[in-house]
Image (tube, grey):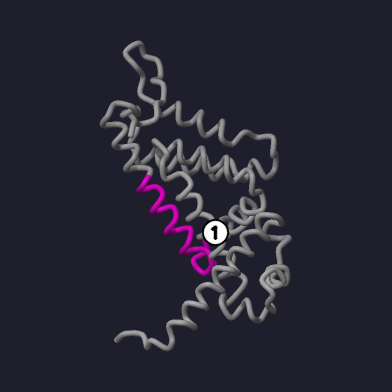
Amino acid sequence: MSTPRMSRGPYRKGLERRKQILRAALEVFSEQGERGSSLKEIAKRVGMSQAGVLHYFESREELLVAVLEERDALDTGAVADAASPGEAVARTVGHNARQPGLVDLFVTLSAGASDPDHPAHDFFTKRYAELSALAEEGLAHAQQRGEVRDDITAEHMARLLLAVSDGLQLQWLLDPSIDMTGMVETFNRMCLAPNDEGQEREQQPEEN
């Protein structure tokens, strides 16, 4: 059954309002992190009451997960032209280092998400399944081209790449002097296939 024409305007307006709240929440969490942020501040930035914000997001927890989903979507779009999964992850952690509040939000929610009843459980389960599958596919193709070592499965390298990335974020929150991008790039070099002289190949971007 088609949606009545008269309801499309309010529905579209509601979607736009939800996006406005989400953008404000991204700003607030980016600046203040999970523990320093509040619905009051987010509501203030969009000119609404806290109850009004919760009309579009049923709880603060739902809003937190929506913020992470939006962050991931923005990160994915920003690295769509990356030549390899490793390059995409290195660029992403470099971008995240400029948004410490969102890194804090990610680490805080992921710590409790192993509980099936946690609001972010489904988000993280889906995230790791999709990202690992995407990275595995890219690494498998690189193995076929002889660019990545083939004595380790693409599946293992993909999972380890994500573990390196997310583990470094926790360490970086404790010690911001850690070079997350540099360490991901080090892991990427460890995955390269050796050349004929037994040395690692130089990682070259693919030509368009």
Decide which of 47, 187 is in the foreground and name it: 47
Q: Is residue 125 above or below residue 20?
A: above
Q: Residue at x 52, y 78 (%)?
A: 14
Please give left or right for residue 133 compared with residue 168 in the image: left
Q: Quadrant of residue 127?
A: bottom left
Count of picture labels = 1
Please give left or right for residue 12 compared with residue 144 in the image: right
Please give left or right for residue 54 compared with residue 186 in the image: right
Q: Position of residue 70 (x, y in %)?
A: 52, 59
The quarter of the picture where the N terminus appears is: bottom left
Q: Position of residue 153 (x, y in %)?
A: 33, 36
Decide which of 40, 45 is in the foreground and name it: 45
* 59 in the magenta segment: no
The amino acid type of the residue labelled 1 equals: Leu
Q: Residue at x 37, y 88 (%)?
A: 4
**Magenta part, dominant SS:** helix
Q: Is residue 48 above or below residue 206?
A: below
The quarter of the picture where the C terminus appears is: top left
Q: Residue at x 51, y 37 (%)?
A: 90
* 131 in the magenta segment: yes
Q: Residue furthest left?
A: 144
Q: Residue at x 42, y 43 (%)?
A: 159
Decide which of 187, 84 is in the foreground and name it: 84
| Range shown magenta | 114-134
Q: Is residue 207 above or below residue 63?
A: above
Q: Secondary structure at mark 1?
A: helix
Q: Position of residue 131 (x, y in %)?
A: 41, 49
- Dot 1: within a 10 Å radius of its alpha carbon, few (fewer than 14), some, or many (20 or more) residues? many
Identify the residue position indicated by label 1 in the image: 68
